[in-house]
Amino acid sequence: MKQKHAAAAIDLGATKTTVLVGSSDTEGQTNVEGFGMVESTGFQNGGIGDIQKVRAGIQEATRLAEESSGTRILSAIVGIAGEHLRSQNERGIITIADRNYPITEEDRERVLEMAGQINISTSQQIIHMLPRKFWIEGTEHVADPVGMYGTRLDAETHIIVGAASSIENLRLCVEGAGVKVDGFLPESVAAAKSALTDEERMQGVALIDIGASTSSICIYEEGAVSHSASLALAGEHLTRDLTQVLRCPWESAEQLKKTYGVAVSSMTPLEETVEIQAFGNPPEKTIQTRHVAEILQARCEEILQEIEVELRRTKTLERIAAGLVLTGGTSSLEGLCQLASQKLRLPARIGYPTRFENIPEQFGSPPFATSIGLLEYALHESNLSIQNTTKQHSSNIAWGGVGRRLRDFGKGFLPQ
Ligand SMILES: Nc1ncnc2c1ncn2[C@@H]1O[C@H](COP(=O)(O)OP(=O)(O)OP(=O)(O)O)[C@@H](O)[C@H]1O
Ligand SMILES: [Mg+2]
């Protein structure tokens, strides 16, 4: 009989809070069983500004996800981002006690533990550790050493560290909403999980998730994560520039950016104009879309330049043959992908997350790469607790009416 394993993931974005519940069975079939999503409030400058509001948002999104999936979410994997994140690669070495026996899973655990022993200050915490490479006898590079013979085993891990205060505040919000944190996963690593191909990971690629408050970077080389980082510069900064230069309210600027915004000013017709809501009297004004594009292009170039600096600093720019894969809501800005390719002289494409049945089509779009990647990680790489609250066993969840109703409901507030 097929056995199901269920898990939940929470993506706390600056604009949307998403909770996903999924399941996978022993035959490898993965399903999204339900979701909850609310507009985020309480975030400020890329961090938590109001704990009560953030907690209330998580509570509501969790309630919706529980209702739609017929489960009770006890714990979840939570995405994390922010400029406080740092990453480094570390190596550990162990000797194998008896060379007559093959390397065991315990040996692999032991060497990874060794590679994870780093000195950090008390104001920092390790968020996540990813195995990168193994070597037997220090020279023979292997994907997985378990079952092979050797006397010395080396491992390299990618370790992500963050500010203890930011991590604990995030935990406080989630656990205050009644969900235990099973682990944190950097948002860029999650997005890379759902939007990259194996070939891109092998040949070297940079996943850039450009959301509202942060641009998160995850670089893969030779099939493993080699660098991850977060920049506090993203879509909100584009909108803020429009409010400042055009002297208009936030909503007006946001609408203008999404509807007429272009990242390459030469792509807009010279004479095209648009009427927007503005401050002062009269409350409308007419502006040239070319002018809007010029404002957006300047900020996009700054974001891309910061990304380039990060890639040069880590000496990865020349090593990512597959170039850039852009996810996050801001990647939908017309012309941004072309501009990125041109400025960094790399191939570039927009990344779409793995498509699941039974959830709104928008979940297959770039703003949801992080949420979907978090769920994939929760389902396949971690153990979580979910209680089934429906009468059916979780392997027999009925998707009829509830699923459809939620699909329609989701359309009301999904980012365009
Ligand atoms: N068509 C579009 N053109 C330009 N920008 C867009 C478009 N659609 C959405 N955006 C922008 O994408 C951003 C939201 O993206 P996303 O949903 O990935 O962010 P988030 O996950 O909530 O935030 P973060 O990951 O930064 O915490 C907003 O700044 C929004 O204005
Ligand atoms: Mg996001």
Image (cartoon, grey):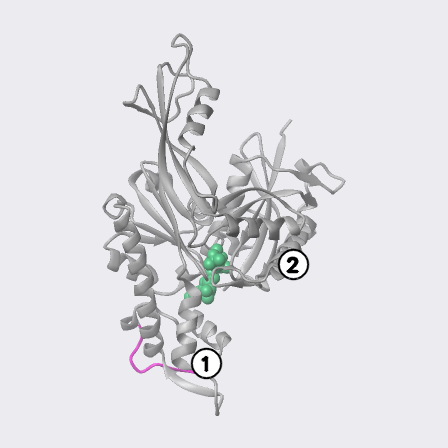
Q: Point out the image quarter for the N terminus.
A: top right
* Secondary element type, mark 1: loop
> Which of pointers 2 and 1 indicates the residue nearer the eye?
2
Q: Can you say whether 241 is above or below 187 in the image?
A: below
State left or right for residue 287 relative to residue 341.
right
Residue drawn 53% across the image and 33% down it: 28
Q: Amino acid at mark 1?
A: Cys
Whether the magenta-drawn stretch holds residue 241 is answered as no
Give 399 or 93, whichever is nearer the viewer.
Answer: 93
> Quadrant of residue 64 in the image?
bottom right
Majority secondary structure of magenta residues? loop
Percent of width and height locating residue 58: 62, 55
Q: Can you say whether 40 is above or below 117 in the image?
A: below
Q: Can you say whether 255 is above or below 88 in the image?
A: below
Percent of width and height locating residue 142: 34, 24
| Mark 1 crowd level (few <14, some 14–19, many ≥20, 10 Å Cα) | many
Residue drawn 29% across the image and 72% down it: 265
Residue that carries the numbered disc 1 in the rendered image: 248
Residue drawn 49% across the image and 79% down it: 249
Give 101 or 159, whichever is nearer the viewer.
Answer: 159
Percent of width and height locating residue 328: 44, 56
Residue drawn 52% across the image and 62% down it: 15
State left or right for residue 101 relative to residue 339.
right
Give 65 or 130, whichever is nearer the viewer.
Answer: 130
Residue that carries the numbered disc 2 in the rendered image: 56
Percent of width and height locating residue 413: 58, 64
Q: Is residue 341 visible?
A: yes
Q: Which residues are magenta?
A: 268-275
Give the residue furthest to the front: 122
Q: How far apart are labels 2 and 1 at the CA level?
A: 30 Å
Q: Amino acid at mark 2?
A: Ala
Label 2 vs 1, first from the N-terminus: 2
